[in-house]
Image (cartoon, grey):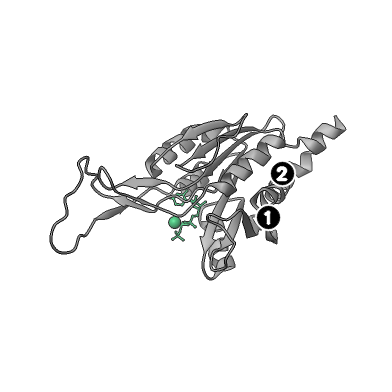
């Protein structure tokens, strides 16, 4: 029993992770999306599984294999991700939002292919709902984690998102440097928590980053009860 608490600290816990980009359709052949390979989110889901959790992975379109033993929910748009995550939120102990959600979508979606015309094209965009902010408002017992990719003012913007979205922790990527974030197999993040922890995790594989992050999150939520 002693060993189980150490090796499987997430045993019996429900974990929901989001990963990858969302894709917002313009017409039959065109779309808007964000850079995101999904690798960080998949690593977080895989490590949570290894630590004993019941894991749900809500994934945008990515080029990665499904993870055995993880409940996969495939979505495309920000709206679909919003619905998939908010309906499952109540039963979760940890929610980690590493997806790169589109902030805007085309106001009108054409089912046909648009034909080109002379001159410029303007596409009117409307805001998507902020999934993480909504979860922060719905939050009861859950430990809620956000991600942020920033090119500048890394800690300042990270801290403001932590507070504004009522998060327990945020992992901030510095995307001004190479090898961090997006398609890479490695990453480096700064972690800020509501309890006041500030920790830099230096460049390492996304799997190793996921292990470090889970050790921070489990310690903060479950530490006292161990
Ligand atoms: N996020 C979300 N729903 C959105 C936009 C973002 O849930 N519609 C989540 C992301 O999954 C991430 C966090 O919010 O965990 C921060 O995303 P980010 O793009 O860095 O922050 P924004 O609040 O969208 O602000 P901005 O893009 O202007 O920096
Ligand atoms: Ca954004």
Residue 77 position, x and y percent, is 38, 42
Horizontal side of 7 relative to 147 (left or right) equals right
The crowd level at tag 2 (other Cα within 10 Å; few <14, some 14-19, many 20+) is some
Where's residue 216, x and y in %? Answer: 71, 50
Residue 136 visible in this rendered orientation of the protein: yes
Instruction: Report the residue that reaches farthest toward the left.
Output: 118
Tell me the residue that label 1 is attached to.
Answer: 195
- Indicate the position of residue 27 as horizontal and vertical percent values: 25, 45
- The one nearer the camera, 94 or 37, is 37
Residue drawn at the location 44% of the way across and 49% of the way down? 101
Disc 1 Cβ-to-ligand 1 distance below 8 Å: no
In this rendering, is residue 127 above or below 50?
A: below
191 vs 208, nearest the viewer: 208
Looking at the image, which residue sits at the far right? 2
The residue shown at (40%, 51%) is: 102
Task: Pinpoint residue 46: horizontal percent, then vertical percent.
Answer: 64, 39
Q: On the rendered image, what quadrant is the N terminus found in?
A: top right
Q: Is mark 2 within 8 Å of ligand 1?
A: no
Mark 2 and mark 1 lie on one chain; the one further toward the N terminus is 1
Q: Label 2: state its secondary structure.
A: helix
Where is the C terminus found, in terms of image quarters?
A: top right
Query: Whole-Å distance between the Cαs marked 2 and 1?
Result: 13 Å
- Counting every numbered tag in the picture gives 2
Residue depicted at 62% across the width and 37% down the height: 93
Q: Residue at x 49, y 33 (%)?
A: 73
Closer to the camera in the image, 91 or 17: 17
Vertical order, 103 against 143 (above or below): below
Residue 58 left/right relative to 92? left
Badge 2 is on which residue?
218
């Amino acid at each position: 029993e002693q060993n189980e608490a150490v090796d499987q600290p997430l045993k019996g816990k429900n974990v929901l992770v989001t990963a990858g980009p969302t894709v917002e359709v313009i017409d039959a052949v065109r779309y808007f999306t964000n850079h995101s390979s999904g690798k960080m989110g998949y690593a977080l889901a895989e490590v949570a599984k290894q630590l004993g959790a019941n894991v749900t992975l809500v994934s945008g379109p990515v080029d990665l294999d499904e993870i055995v033993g993880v409940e996969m929910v495939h979505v495309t748009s920000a709206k679909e991700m919003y619905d998939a995550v908010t309906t499952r939120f109540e039963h979760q102990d940890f929610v980690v939002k590493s997806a790169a959600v589109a902030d805007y979508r085309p106001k009108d979606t054409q089912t046909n292919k648009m034909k080109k015309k002379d001159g410029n094209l303007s596409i009117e965009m409307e805001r998507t709902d902020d999934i993480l902010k909504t979860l922060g408002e719905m939050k009861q017992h859950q430990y809620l984690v956000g991600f942020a990719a920033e090119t500048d003012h890394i800690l300042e913007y990270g801290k403001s998102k932590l507070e504004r979205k009522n998060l327990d922790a945020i992992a901030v990527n510095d995307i001004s440097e190479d090898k961090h974030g997006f398609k890479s197999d490695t990453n480096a993040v700064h972690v800020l928590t509501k309890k006041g922890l500030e920790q830099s995790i230096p460049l390492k594989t996304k799997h190793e980053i996921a292990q470090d992050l889970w050790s921070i999150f489990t310690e903060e939520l479950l530490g006292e009860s161990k």
